[in-house]
Amino acid sequence: MREKEVGVLTDNRRVVVRLPHHLVDALDQVASGEGRHRSELIRESVEFYLAEQRRQEIRQALIQGYQEMGFLNSALAEERWDLVGVPKE
């Protein structure tokens, strides 16, 4: 085993997950076809899911921020244009 793999194994924790037979069979087919272990695919799937959840949180925060800034920008646009020589319509 390579040094990096040993470090990964010692840093990992075992988690027991129950899956329906059809998911385990499909998972095993993919793992076998790619020459990888079931655990690798599950780990990557969880990492992908968590990253996607984080992206969704960031996207929602950006949407909210842009909406809030839209109101502020609109309010600023309405303020005292006459002071800079632009007549208000």
Image (cartoon, rainbow, N blue to C red):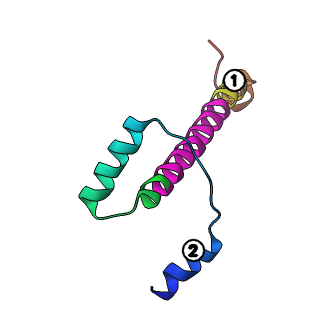
Secondary structure state at the residue bearing disc 2 = helix
Question: Comparing marks 2 and 1, which lies closer to the viewer?
Answer: 2
Coordinates of residue 10 in the picture (x, y in percent): 62, 76
Q: Are marks 2 and 1 in contact (CB under 8 Å)?
A: no
Q: Looking at the picture, how far across and down is residue 79, in whole percent?
A: 74, 24
> Which badge, 2 or 1, comes first in the chain's sequence?
2
Query: Image check: 51 left or right of 24?
Result: right
Say above or below: 2 vs 83.
Answer: below
Q: Please give left or right for residue 19 compared with residue 30 in the image.
A: right
Task: Say which quadrant the N terminus sits in.
Answer: bottom left
> Where is residue 6, by image quadrant?
bottom right
What span is colored magenta in the figure? 43-66
Q: Position of residue 68 (x, y in %)?
A: 70, 28
Q: Which element type, helix, strand or loop, lies under badge 1?
A: helix
Residue 27 falls inside the magenta stretch: no
Name the residue that disc number 2 marks.
Answer: 9
Q: Position of residue 85 (x, y in %)?
A: 67, 28
Residue at 51% x, 88% y: name it: 3
**83 and 31: which is toward the camera:** 31
Dot 1 crowding, Cα within 10 Å, few <14, some 14–19, many 20+ = few
Query: Which residue sits at x=27%, y=60%?
Result: 34
**Which label number is shown at residue 48?**
none
- Which residue is labeled 1 in the image? 71
Q: Amino acid at mark 1?
A: Phe
How would you rate the neighbour count of disc 2 (Cα within 10 Å): few for under 14, some for 14-19, many for 20 or more?
few
What residue is at 60 percent from the left and 31 percent from the top? Answer: 63
CA gap, disc 2 and disc 1 = 51 Å
Residue kind at label 2, given as amino acid type: Leu
Q: Quadrant of the C terminus?
A: top right
